[in-house]
């Protein structure tokens, strides 16, 4: 069994957005309160974090997770996906924690976090091992097979991941045929849908639905990286086709 816990399902602004008083940002429904995107995937005793957002510490406190992490998968180097890396310290005391990212992201992380990613580290900093992985590449973590999926974030090549039979893709606008092939046979898709209006670097909700259906007509799918422009969860989720849902912070799915 694979369990995925949605730690954050919001866009880079988060929801509510600071200074906004729309009905979503003023909603009392906890499903409309979205931290920046991240997820915990657990399989066969292995705990894998996908992205490490600026809200990582709060996310760990919210979900009550007090276990160990076996790996962190980075989709790309934008701050809303890596801003919590310093808070990995509690998870790297016993052993160095491996982080996987594409070469472009690795280079930027070394520039931004040199104190974490040098050979001779200052005492107390996260003990991290940064590993490069490219689209189509695979690695085994605790017996769990992880494959990097090449996708495009506007004009920027980034990574999604296949973790066992779960596909996790965020910030995508398009995917090459080779990336689609790597998702064949998944039993759950997590994919981004920023809003209903077109955006140059993100899918719309409607494009997320179409992408899911293009992989398989009955593929269970949860949409993430949602902005306040999507609308109220209670309204929008009910309008989606069968088997497709808006994810929300704290949601736990077993596959």
Image: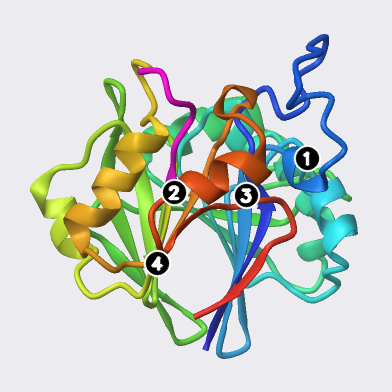
Could you tell me how far apart the alpha carbons at marks 2 and 3 are, in whole angstroms? Answer: 23 Å
Residue at the spot x=78%, y=24% of the render?
A: 25
What residue is pinned by disc 3?
38
The question of residue 161 being in magenta is answered with no
Q: Of tags 2 and 4, which is closer to the observer?
A: 2
Which numbered disc, 1 or 2, marks the residue closer to the eye?
2
The residue singled out by tag 2 in the image is 240
Task: Find residue 169 and report its horizontal and vertical position in percent.
Answer: 40, 49
Q: Earlier in the sequence, mark 4 or mark 3?
A: 3
What residue is drawn where x is 23% and y is 75%? 185
- The quadrant holding residue 221 is bottom left
**Of the image marks 4 and 1, the number of the one nearer the N terminus:** 1
Q: Is residue 254 above or below residue 21?
A: below
Are the residues tagged 1 and 3 within 8 Å (C-beta)? yes
Q: Residue furthest left?
A: 177
Please report contact status of discs 4 and 1: CB closer than 8 Å, yes or no.
Answer: no
- Residue position for label 4: 220
Specify the segment rendered in magenta: 191-198
Please determine whether, in this image, residue 69 is positioned above or below residue 153. below
What predominant SS class does the magenta segment belong to?
loop
* Callout 4: SS: loop
Could you tell me if residue 117 is visible in this image? Answer: no
Q: Where 113 sits versus 71, above or below?
A: above
| In front: label 4 or label 3 | 4
- Cβ atoms at labels 4 and 3 below 8 Å apart: no
Residue at (59, 37) in percent of width and height? 81
In this rendered view, identify the residue nearer to me: 119 or 173: 173
Count residues near mark 1 (Cα–Cα under 10 Å), then give few for <14, some for 14-19, many for 20+.
many
Determine which residue is flagged by label 1: 55
């Amino acid at each position: 069994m694979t369990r995925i816990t949605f730690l954050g399902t919001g866009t880079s602004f988060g929801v509510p957005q600071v200074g906004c008083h729309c009905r979503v940002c003023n909603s009392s429904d906890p499903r409309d309160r979205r931290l920046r995107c991240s997820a915990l995937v657990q399989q066969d005793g292995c705990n894998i974090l996908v992205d490490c957002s600026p809200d990582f510490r709060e996310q760990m406190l919210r979900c009550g997770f007090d276990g160990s992490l076996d790996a962190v998968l980075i989709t790309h180097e934008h701050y809303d996906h890596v801003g919590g890396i310093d808070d990995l310290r509690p998870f790297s005391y016993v052993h160095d924690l491996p982080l996987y990212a594409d070469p472009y992201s690795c280079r930027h992380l070394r520039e931004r976090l040199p104190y974490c990613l040098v050979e001779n580290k200052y005492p107390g900093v996260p003990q991290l091992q940064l590993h490069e992985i490219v689209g189509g590449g695979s690695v085994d973590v605790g017996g769990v097979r992880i494959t990097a999926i090449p996708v495009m974030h506007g004009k920027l090549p980034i990574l999604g991941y296949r973790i066992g039979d779960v596909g996790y893709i965020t910030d995508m606008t398009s995917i090459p045929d080779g990336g689609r092939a790597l998702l064949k046979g998944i039993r759950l898709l997590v994919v981004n849908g920023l809003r209903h209006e077109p955006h140059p670097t993100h899918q719309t909700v409607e494009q997320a639905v179409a992408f899911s259906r293009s992989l398989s007509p009955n593929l269970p799918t949860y949409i993430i990286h949602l902005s306040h422009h999507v609308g109220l969860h209670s309204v929008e989720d009910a309008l989606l086709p069968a088997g497709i849902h808006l994810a929300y912070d704290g949601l736990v799915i077993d596959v």
